[in-house]
Each structure stands twice: as C-alpha cells, then as structure tokens.
Image: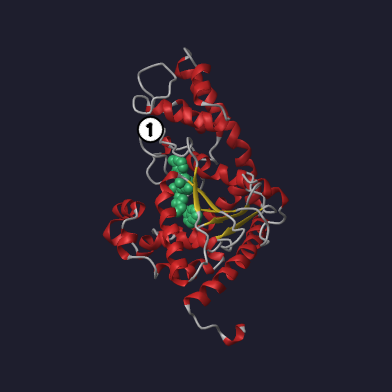
Amino acid sequence: MSEASDQSSGPVTTGTVKPRVLSGIQPTADSFHLGNYLGALRQWVALQDTHDAFYCVVDLHAITVRHDPAALRRRTRVAAAQLLAMGLDPDRATIFVQSQVPEHTELAWVLGCLTGFGEAGRMTQFKDKSAKQGATGTTVGLFTYPILQAADILLYSPEPGPGERALRVPVGEDQRQHLELTRTLAQRFNHRFGDTFVLPDASIIEGAAKITDLQEPTAKMSKSASSPQGIIDVLEEPGPMRKKIMRAVTDTGTEVRFDEEGKAGIANLLRIYSALEGVSIADLERRYEGSGYGRFKKDLAALVVDTFTPIRERTLKLLDDQDGLDRILADGAGRAGAVARRTMEVVRDRVGFAGRALDR
Ligand code: AMP
Ligand code: TRP
C-alpha cells in the first residue's frame, strides 16, 4: 500500500493522496457466509486504513431475481450492520445503500448504451443465473446487472490526469469478468467522450479467494447453491457452526495435507484455517502431522467460532438501534452522493445532454 496514504484526511475529500477503493455486496441473505468474509469482506476492512473507501450494499442488484420487499429491507439493514460489526468504521469509510444514490441507475443507462448486446451476453454469471431462473424468470435486469456494477464502480472513479489515483475493487475471483467489462466500458467512454474515468483494478485475494462447500468441497460455498450443512453463516450460533465443521466432508485418509485434487475437503479446511489464523498452509501441515482429522477440525471449529461470535454480537446490537443504523447509512449516502453527483455532471456534459437552465 502506498506510503503517501498516511498523509490523507477525511473519507471523501478530493485532492487527498489516498488511492480509492470501492466494492459492493448484495443483501440477498439473512447473513453473510464464510466465503463472503474470506473472499471479500475481510479485505474491505483492511483497506479502509490505507484507502479512501466506498462500500455499498447493492440492493438494486438484489432485485434482478424475484424478491420479497420486506425481506429485502431487512436484509439490507442486516448486511450493513454486519459490515459495521466486522470493523468498517463510518468515520473512515463511506458505507451506503446503492438505491439511496440514484446516480447509480443513471450512469448504468449511459453505460448500457455503450455495451454491445453480444458483449453482455458473454457474461458467465448471467449464463449461470439465467439457466437457473429459466426463460420466464430471467429478467432484463439480470442481463444488465454487470452494467449496473460498472456504474457502481465508475461513479467513484477519481479524476484521471496528472497525479492520477488508483481505483481498486476488491472482489472474489468470480467477479473478474465483470471487472474486465467495467474496464472496457471505461476505456470506451474515455475514447469516445474524452478522459473521464480511471480504469479500475480488480484486487482478487489470492489463496483465500475461493472457499468451497463443506459438504461438496469441489463446489463454491454459495448461499444459492449450498445446502445449509455446506455453508457457515457469519451470524450462526456457535453450536451449529462447530457441528458443521466437525461434519465437513473429507476423505478416507488421515493425513492433513494440502492436495486440491485428491483431498478437496481437507484442502478447503486448510485454506480457511490459514486465512483466519494468518499462518501458512505448510505450517498447519506440520502442526497437524500425524494427528488425524479430529483434532484439526476441532481446532478449526474453535477458531471459526472465536472469529464470528463477536461479529454476531455486535451485529445484533446494531440492529437493536434501527434509527441509529439508518442514520449511519443516510450519512454514507450523503457522502457517496456528493461524489456521484460530481461524476454525473461531467458525464452528462461529455455525453451531450443539454443542462437545465436552473443548473446554470
Ligand atoms: P455473493 O454473495 O455471491 O454475491 O458474493 C459476495 C462477495 O463474496 C463477492 O465478492 C464474491 O466474489 C465473494 N464470494 C462469494 N462466495 C465466495 C466463496 N465461496 N469464496 C470466496 N469468495 C466468495
Ligand atoms: N456483483 C458483485 C457480486 O456479486 C456485487 C457488486 C455490485 C459489486 N456492484 C459492485 C462488487 C461494485 C464490486 C463493485 O459480488
């Protein structure tokens, strides 16, 4: 991370030297899971110290598949509360709800008009999700989902030019293609209308990037695909959490050794352990040499419970004070909106929209 970042002040002031970071997560479950935490959210927390950080709960993305309004509202608050409970600090990072900043949809329209139909059709996440939804369940919103994501990112692009700041986007491996599309669209916009956006960098977290299902260790841990036994929720009680780790599928061997092909279950548990404790997999292999799977799983279960218990407790406390939580989010939306509005003023002008007389 850059040394210059230490000299910076508040979270949204322009002209600071901190590189910017932006990411989003969907409020589509009643809890985040271990894969979200290790693949993305933990990095968000770390990056707030060195970056000018913007993190959004992407509720507009959550309605690309059929949803229940009451559940969406509840999950949006639960998502925000978990982010705060994991250590995001609203004084250092701008935490907001996507739908509270209407510029996201506005920029998405403009970018959609720069996206080829075939180009959007090549997004593998769309192909996967639309296959699951079937012909009638697949909406145009699901198709244009990555364009809205590009808008989420580019709205917070620092100004290009001399002394240009970076724009980092920490996400899991599965989002690489959407980031590539975002870069392509930024480049296309810049080329057609003049330098406006900095091209974002995906910061994919190596090693911990892909956590797999505890029951089906060759498949990704995922709220939509995993059975409850295969997934560890951040807000889960310690009892079930422990049980799930003890019952995680392994193999008929006894050796705690990293072998992705031959021992996918153990490899996944080693990845989780290593990421949570901050020790190398090689060290863990040495630590558990000759000890069998039982002790290894028991220690890992304790580690997972110790990591998530304080987060669960803080989340529940934050949810108890809904007004307080909503105020934090309104403040975040105010700060994000100020940046988004500035970007949109430039975009509108470059695209050729005639300004309203009132604005002049
Ligand atoms: P999702 O809940 O699938 O929308 O994902 C939210 C964030 O968590 C994204 O950045 C994903 O890439 C990341 N993520 C989701 N599932 C996993 C997983 N099993 N392992 C690692 N990262 C994940
Ligand atoms: N599509 C991302 C996911 O599924 C969520 C997301 C929406 C996002 N907008 C974003 C991630 C902007 C990074 C930046 O995880």
Question: Residue lying farthest front?
Answer: 162
Q: Is residue 335 left or right of residue 228?
A: right
Q: Residue furthest left?
A: 135
Quadrant location of the N terminus in the rendered image: top right
Amino acid at circle 1:
Pro
Vertical comparison of 356 with 326: above or below? below
Q: Kindly tell me whether residue 101 is visible in this rendering.
A: yes
Q: Position of residue 80 (x, y in %)?
A: 58, 52
Coloring scheme used: secondary structure
Q: Nearer the viewer, residue 97 or 148?
A: 148
Q: How many marks?
A: 1
Quarter assignment of residue 97: bottom right
Residue at (51%, 62%) from the top-left corner?
154
Quadrant into which the C terminus falls: bottom right
Residue 70, visible in the rendered structure: no
Q: In front: 336, or 100? A: 336
Residue under label 1: 217
Residue at 39% across / 25% down in the picture? 259
Q: Does dot 1 land on a helix, a strand or a loop?
A: loop
Where residue 256 appears, x then y in whole percent? 44, 19
